[in-house]
Amino acid sequence: MEKETGLNLLISREEIDNIVMSLAVRIEKDYHDKNPLVICILKGSFVFTSDLVRHLGINLEVEFIRTSSYGLGTQSCGQVKLVSDTVTDIRDRHVIIIEDIIDTGITTSFVFDYLKGRNPASLRICSLLSKPSRRKVNITIDYPGLDIPDKFVVGYGLDCAEKYRNLPEIYFIEEEETCQQD
Ligand code: PRP
């Protein structure tokens, strides 16, 4: 994919790999005998989840939930929509929510509360990235990857108006830039 101007490298492929591997080590240790259900929050987490599970040498299952809150802009509209749900019954399962990024925390908090209501045996959160300065709701990230500054980031599953999800690295976009759909 041709890189466009306005994209600034924030996290290299090597740094991402190191973060993913260190998270996998921690999760493996905690869940080696638990057959966890790893729930990927679509769409943004699909790349991170696929890398993470390939570093987990334990029995596990993968499920998907799709939410949406950002629309085509760079600011969350603050209202989370559940676009599609898991098929697997999560009751009495050890569930790990996989997020690409926690910004305001509204999406993860919504998903956490929703899943909690379905009585899993345990429920934890793993997020590759976090923007603590943007938080509007309290979230405990059990498996945190990297804290980043308040910049709009794309690549490695993260989009801007659906673009850039396929970039292997993570870039930030300048504030004044708007995301256009082609
Ligand atoms: C992004 C991201 C997180 C959420 C974080 O998803 O993947 O799920 O926003 O923001 P928050 O902490 O402020 O709620 P988005 O709603 O853009 O959908 P997408 O994953 O399909 O791009």
Image: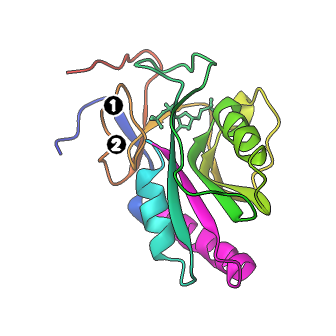
Provide residue 63's location: percent of width, then percent of height: 51, 57
Ligand 1, seen in the image, is in the quarter at top right
Dot 2 falls on a residue whose secondary structure is: loop
Residue 101 found in image quarter: top right
**Which image quarter is the C terminus in?**
top left
Q: Residues within 10 Å of mark 2 (few under 14, many from 20)?
A: many
The answer to whether the residue bearing label 2 lies less than 8 angstroms from the nearest atom of ligand 1 is yes
Q: Is residue 17 visible?
A: no
Provide residue 94's location: percent of width, then percent of height: 72, 66
Tell which of 103 and 60 is nearer to you.
60
Provide residue 76's location: percent of width, then percent of height: 57, 21
For image coordinates 38% across by 52% down, the residue present is 169
Q: Which residues are magenta?
A: 15-42
Q: Which residue is mark 1?
A: 162
Q: Is residue 180 visible?
A: yes
In the depicted structure, whether residue 53 falls above or below residue 106 = below
Residue 149 has which mark?
none
